[in-house]
Image (cartoon, helix red, strand yellow):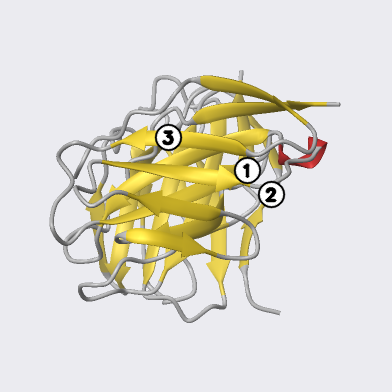
Amino acid sequence: DGGITQSPKYLFRKEGQNVTLSCEQNLNHDAMYWYRQDPGQGLRLIYYSQIVNDFQKGDIAEGYSVSREKKESFPLTVTSAQKNPTAFYLCASSIAATGDAYEQYFGPGTRLTVT
Amino acid sequence: LAKTTQPISMDSYEGQEVNITCSHNNIATNDYITWYQQFPSQGPRFIIQGYKTKVTNEVASLFIPADRKSSTLSLPRVSLSDTAVYYCLVGSGTGGFKTIFGAGTRLFVKA
């Protein structure tokens, strides 16, 4: 059964702590993405990766870090430098297209609360 | 990436056809138009994608005029379960891995 998994579904942390959100896909997709969604808002791109061992900053990368050591995995670390980390975090993947449009497949999300 | 403009919200009743229009005046030649649906506390789900004219699948239809500066997502005979946020995206795979999700259109379907 192919898809994207994110864990945990809910995560609580104290301010000042780093926290890592997991994202795994078995779709054999080259591209993976991390988005942040605040209440009533659209999705904002944090980081994306087109291929293993490569990733690019999105629109709101400050205070976040990622790694892409394996094709299947794209973990996101929310560092203590992120001023407003409480949000709904979504991971997605897509086939690395070359000229054609692409469809992104999303995971179920992780709701992070930092107090 | 081309910016899109959609209505913030729409209301409908069960059984009606709903049309959501998206404006994308600076769409590029290589850009496709893609629509996603999102339920609360879930990730968005792909609905339909098109380049020009009309595309239809089992869920919706997408109408794109010749100038491609706008597009209309048509949901036939909506039900309460179609209450969701609908996002219109414009972009292509070539250098277009960065996807911009705007605020979307909140559709409320009433009984």
**Residue position marked by numbered label 1 in the rendering:** A110
Q: Disc 3 marks which residue?
A: B21
* Label 3, residues with CA under 10 Å away: few <14, some 14-19, many ≥20: some
For marks 1 and 2, give the one nearer the viewer: 1
Mark 2 = which residue? A8
- Decide: is B8 above or below B90: above
Q: Nearer the viewer, mark 3 or mark 2?
A: 3
Q: How far apart are marks 3 and 2 (CA)?
A: 36 Å
Viewer-proximal residue among A92 and B92: B92
Q: Which of marks 1 and 3 is in front?
A: 3
A107 up-or-down from B69: above or below: below
Give the amino acid at mark 3.
Thr
- Percent x, y of residue B103: 44, 27
Q: From what the image shows, is residue B30 above or below residue A26?
A: above
Q: Which amino acid does label 1 sit on?
A: Thr
Secondary structure under badge 1?
strand
Q: Distance between the residues labelled 1 and 2?
A: 6 Å
Task: Say which chain tag 1 marks.
Answer: A
- Residue B23 position in % (x across, y down): 30, 34
Q: In the image, what residue occupies the spot 69% across and 49% down? A: A8
- Depth order, front residue of B98/A66: B98
* Chain at numbered mark 3: B
Mark 1 nearby-residue class (10 Å; few <14, some 14–19, many ≥20): many
Q: In which quarter of the image is the N terminus of chain B?
A: top left
Q: In this view, does B84 lie to the left or right of A58?
A: right
Image x and y of residue B10, in percent: 59, 22
Looking at the image, tell me whether mark 1 or mark 2 is earlier in sequence order: 2
